[in-house]
Image: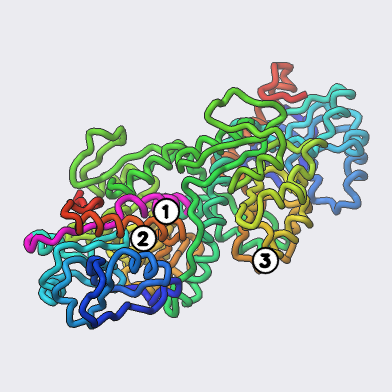
Amino acid sequence: MDKIGVLVTHKPLPYLEQELTRRGCRLFRLWESPESRRLEFCRENSSEIRAIVGNSNFGADAATIDALPKLEIVASFSVGLDKVDLPKCKERGIRVTNTPDVLTDDVADLAIGLTISVMRRIPSADKYARSGAWKKGEYTLTTRFSGKRVGILGLGRIGLAIAKRAEAFDCPISYYSRSEKPHPNYTYYSTPVDLASNCDILVVACALTEETRHIVNRAVIDALGPKGVLINIGRGPHVDEPELVAALVEGRLGGAGLDVFENEPHVPEELFALDNVVLVPHVASATIETRTAMADLVLGNLEAHFLKKPLLTAVV
Amino acid sequence: MYAFPSHTAASIPTSDETPTSDLPPLLVLRPLSDTWLSALNAKFTLYSPSSPLSASVHAALISGAYNRVDPALLDQYPSLRCLVNTGAGVNHINLEECKRRGVQVANVGETHSKNVADYAVGLLLDVMRRITMSDRYVRNGLWVTRGNYPLGSKLGGKRVGIVGLGSIGSAIAKRLEAFECKISYLSRKAKPTVSYRYIPNICDLAAESDILVVSCALTKETHHIVNKQVLQALGKEGIIINIGRGASIDEPELVRCLAQGEIKGAGLDVFEHEPNIPKELIELENVVLTPHQSVFTPEAMAEVIQICIANFEAFFTGKPVITPVVAD
């Protein structure tokens, strides 16, 4: 990939940056420009930029694509492609790749980790233990996880991996999907509200599209109810965040484990005082093993493209 | 011994009168909540230790948080023939002595196993994926000012060594298999019905594990079973989870290893001198510390009451107890 100009939209994994450089790429570090200057930065370097390495925060929107006439490929360091203007890429003949499968396990692990964390209030118990309060009295009862009904929005790779783990805890599994899938052990519900009415824990595990934006809205939150728990390892915009915050603060929703937010890295501060909420900073794929595997996919896809070989994980 | 629980009331029933009801007499040696009292009062006549009739009662309800069942206690209540324990562990009960005196001992079977296993997995995921620490990071506003949190470790594919494959250890193994962990275990004897790899020596188990889970009963043999050698064998990348008893681990040595980076991290629900936690642990970020919480859910509490009642009813109708303590 000698002298190929690559626009990197976010501060990358050191391994990825080293490898891109080692293979001869010329890196253009978009995240180092202030937001207001970013399009200009693209235009200034447009004669060289032939590839973008994007992520879940910044991919390739229409304006960026328009500023880069030599762009040939967008290799996203993520599985979600909601930040890539796919129709525009198709129109321009730009290839798009993502990082499926390598992160499925970590994301599913975090979904379960967040669930147990919320239901058993582990962060709050840890705080209690460290504060010395234990010497004065016992911590409160918390809610059992095993055997609870788990409802999954989206039964793709990640949804199935979550189901498999939850089954080991004897959790009955139900799901909502665009169409029913051949899983006789899992109960299908044809609307998100029906699913929410019939589960104790609702997990968001679908892709973010125009149809699934705010799929968890007031009606779904009401259906999940004061004993229900919401787990979001999808995208912030899957959930109507102000409605979620109000429901949690007012006790109309039992709890939430959130890895994603509508306006990352900003998290609604009203949630900070709540014990029945666990908030983590978009870490579902954030292990050294998985990020390295994701980097290898990005590198592999870029190399394949510039060597005119078949791409590894093309979406467009 | 734990601090006095706030979710159980402070009342021990006192009935000094000669029994007028037909309900079998039950000695209650631990404080009970109203939920417990109303459930038990419906089936039994309750007596407290202060009752002059206490020495003639055949069955007693006990708990490790309040009672030590030793020759002294058994001498104090010489008519006892049935003890039902409300917790998971029985290290406070001299089982040999009970057997010698013909006293049946029951605990609450597998009720606690699910909760404890869930908690063990929760602690492990928390340590590997830094859930508590990154939650704290977010709440302190640092995601905005400092950017992304440091990377965690993948659980899938890791080698887990389970110390003690009883009801709790088995429940943990079943769960971790779904996360694609590779399970090995140590137990007094190999279990031919399980597919996990048996490693009879704890140092070898630690050497071949990325994660060590302590889920054994506390006995003379398992006191400090995790010692300096075992921790060295576990090594710099190793994680330890303890949902058994604090004294199964040499705590000062564990603290030293964690502070000096000789093992990578720990999730601890139990400690040698509860409710005291070593100050050095409280200052570490590579540990998750919880106040002996693994069993306490309302679902389990309700089940515990039912199982205890069922055990006493079996005893009073001349049958053996339903969930006898099985030494394994």
The reply, left or right, for residue A120 in relation to residue A81 is left
- Tag 1: Cα neighbours inside 10 Å, few (<14), some, or many (≥20)? many
The reply, left or right, for residue A311 in relation to residue B25 is right
Disc number lying in front (1 or 3): 1
Disc number lying in front (1 or 2): 2
Query: Closest to the observer: B279 or A222?
Result: A222
Q: Secondary structure at mark 2?
A: helix
Looking at the picture, the colour scheme in use is: rainbow
Furthest-top residue in this view = A309
Residue B115 bears which disc, if any? 1
Residue type at numbered disc 1: Asn
Residue A272 bears which disc, if any? 3
| Quarter of the figure with residue B22 | bottom left
Q: Please say whether residue B224 is visible from this viewpoint.
A: no
Separation (CA) of disc 1 from disc 3 = 27 Å
Separation (CA) of disc 1 from disc 2 = 16 Å
Q: Chain of mark 1?
A: B
Q: Residue at x 23, y 71 (%)?
A: B27
Q: Please say whether residue A294 is visible from this viewpoint.
A: yes
Q: What is the span of residues highlighted in magenta in the rendered image?
A: B100-122
Residue type at numbered disc 2: Ile
Q: Secondary structure at mark 3?
A: loop
Q: Chain of mark 2?
A: B
The reply, left or right, for residue A299 in relation to residue B199 is right
* Sequence-wise first label, 1 or 2: 1
| Tag 2 residue | B305
Residue A61, given in percent of the width and then of the height, sits at 86, 38
Q: Residue at x 56, y 38 (%)?
A: A162
- Tag 3: Cα neighbours inside 10 Å, few (<14), some, or many (≥20)? some
Screen quadrant of the C terminus of chain A? top right
